[in-house]
Amino acid sequence: MTDVSRMQQLRARALSLRPDRAQLTSDLIAALTFAVVNVPQAMGHALLATVNPVMGIFTLMMAVPVGAIFNSSVFMNVSSTAALSVAAGVVLIEFPVEQRLDALVVLVLLVGVIQLLAGLFRLGFLVRFVSNAVMTGFLNGVAVLIILGQLSDLTGYASQFANRVAKALDLLLRINQVDPWVSLIGLATLGLIVLLLRIGRVQRFAFIIAIAAATVLLLGLTISTLPSAAGFASVPTVGDVASIPRALPRLALPDLSLVPVLLLPALSVAVIGLVQGAGVSQGTPNPDGRYPDVSRDFFGQGAANIVTSLANGIPAGGSVSGTALVMSAGAKSRWANFLVGLFVAVIVLLAAPLVELVPMPALAALLIVAGFQGLRIPQAVIAWKTGRISRIVMAVTFVATLVVPLQFAVLFGMALSIVLHVFRQSNKVVVTEWVLQPGGFPLERPPPERLPSNRLTVLHVYGSLFFAAAKSMEEMLPEVSRAHRAVVAINLRGKSEIGSTFVTVLQRYCEALRAHDSRLMLVGVDPTVRDQLAKTGILRTIGEESVFVATPQLGEALNRAVADAEAWLARPAERRGQDGGVPASAKTSSDA
């Protein structure tokens, strides 16, 4: 790229960041709506990450505007997400409480660096290796974990088990030990959220209205002099868990000694964020109708996490729900996300005392609803009906998400998906016979079980030619033990590379044909494949005159091979022996 082109791109980028006065009012409304709705949700996400709820607010304050600056996607909202928070929580829970903040800073910093490098090295194409079945199983597993993880705050019963599935089973066995006052606030909030989500006009404000109502209800019951309301004093609030500082986040320096311990978990969290972000990026076109550059969105998410780590925030990534909310609230440009940080800062500075009054069971109810909203039931049905491989990958990833540490679950699902894909593709090969028709296209049919004598048999190969597929193909080739004076032409057009197993198959089949006074031809051979044959010595075995290189004109190599084979079959046997089994005219036959 020339210096002029770079300057033009930078100028266009700078112009795109300049606010449009005609759109600014809509962007302000969208930013305010998002900030009000997502402050309590971000606090809940911080609880999922097992850290102070205020750190979720710090994430909104820093990650959303930084992502808006660097993303290719105009509308992508880079903020806290349930999946990232759960993944971070599984990592951080292994650290003592006094060391958890240091671990959070390093974890988020590493996530940002990994994502930034993925953007710089243009690794957006790697998202295609994470199958839909893996992400469906993983996200459904995360949604279930979110729901199960809130049962303690919702009911007031603290199980001694570590695994969330085990905690849920333990709660069922000890249902009589739940705190009725805590449960009443939690279930009332849950019911109100579900009700408000069914009312179109207030749907987008359902969370904030329900949280506010639960806060007012608990405050009124706590100060009430009624004897029946005395039990509500035991209901925990955000202020009981942690105090919210009436100030902007302070600079946090990473403890680099934690890098070796957190590098692999950070890779898993980074992958989760990138895959989620890629889904948002590719599902949300920019105002000009073009789809964003995934690699540059990687860079934007990385930059957002690096800045967030220095502000004690939790991991951030492309948020499906956040992007949808900003757009539905009327966003017209990237300034809607950029202004979110400003409004969140105002809320922290002016409304922190009110936030501390929010009941913890109310936040638990909010996250349970978010968990149900995060279930990908239609996608799971599609993956289940697609085929056996998709079912296995999705089910195993789902179970792994519930059982093994979350940072390993998505990597395990990816590895399983790749292994099963390679297994399926390595065995996916079909051999057909092309029966040549005078003046028309060939007729395709299954190959003969036994090779017919005294004629040409043209075979075409579909699928992979590596590993097990080569062995499978060998079993599909016509049996030559009873053949005499036969020619087999294998069409390899479109195969740009072959494996060593396939080379061995060709060698064996060629030798078997020669033992019965027959001949093997390779048609439509790519120049790269011909070089492979030459380097391995198989070209000498088959004969250079029996390898017809592909040309731009379709059918030219096959027509030359057919003419050569017919001339060879018409020649007397003793003449073929004098020429080494090959007619003199054929020794110069090759396609340029």
Image (cartoon, rainbow, N blue to C red):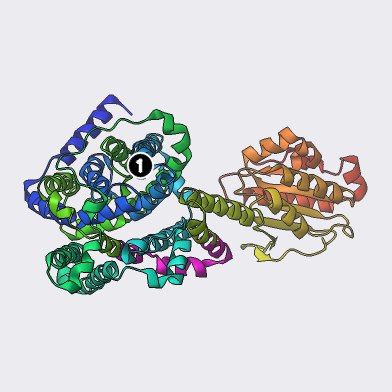
> Residue 522, relative to residue 448: is it above or below?
above
Q: Amino acid at mark 1?
A: Phe
Residue 81 x %, y %? 32, 53
Q: Residues within 10 Å of mark 1 (few under 14, many from 20)?
A: many
Q: Residue at x 12, y 64 (%)?
A: 223
Q: Locate the N terminus by quadrant.
A: top left
Q: Closer to the camera, 119 or 141?
A: 141
Closer to us: 181 or 537 = 181
Residue 174: x and y in percent read 43, 70
Q: Is residue 368 magenta?
A: yes
Residue 200, position in %: x, y? 18, 72
For image coordinates 54% across by 65% down, the residue present is 391
At 32% from the left and 51% from the top, the residue drawn is: 281
Which image quarter is the C terminus in? top right
Residue corresponding to mark 1 = 298
Q: Is residue 382 located in the magenta-colored stretch of the structure?
A: yes
Residue 74, placed above or below residue 143: above
Question: Residue at point 77% right, 48% down?
Answer: 505
Q: Nearer the viewer, residue 210 or 562?
A: 210
* Res 68 quadrant in image: top left
Query: In this rendering, is residue 515 above or below 160?
Result: above
Magenta residues span: 367-395
As helix, strand or loop, the secondary structure at mark 1 comes to helix
Snapshot quadrant of residue 112: top left
Can the viewer see residue 262 in this picture? yes
List the single residue furthest toward the front: 227
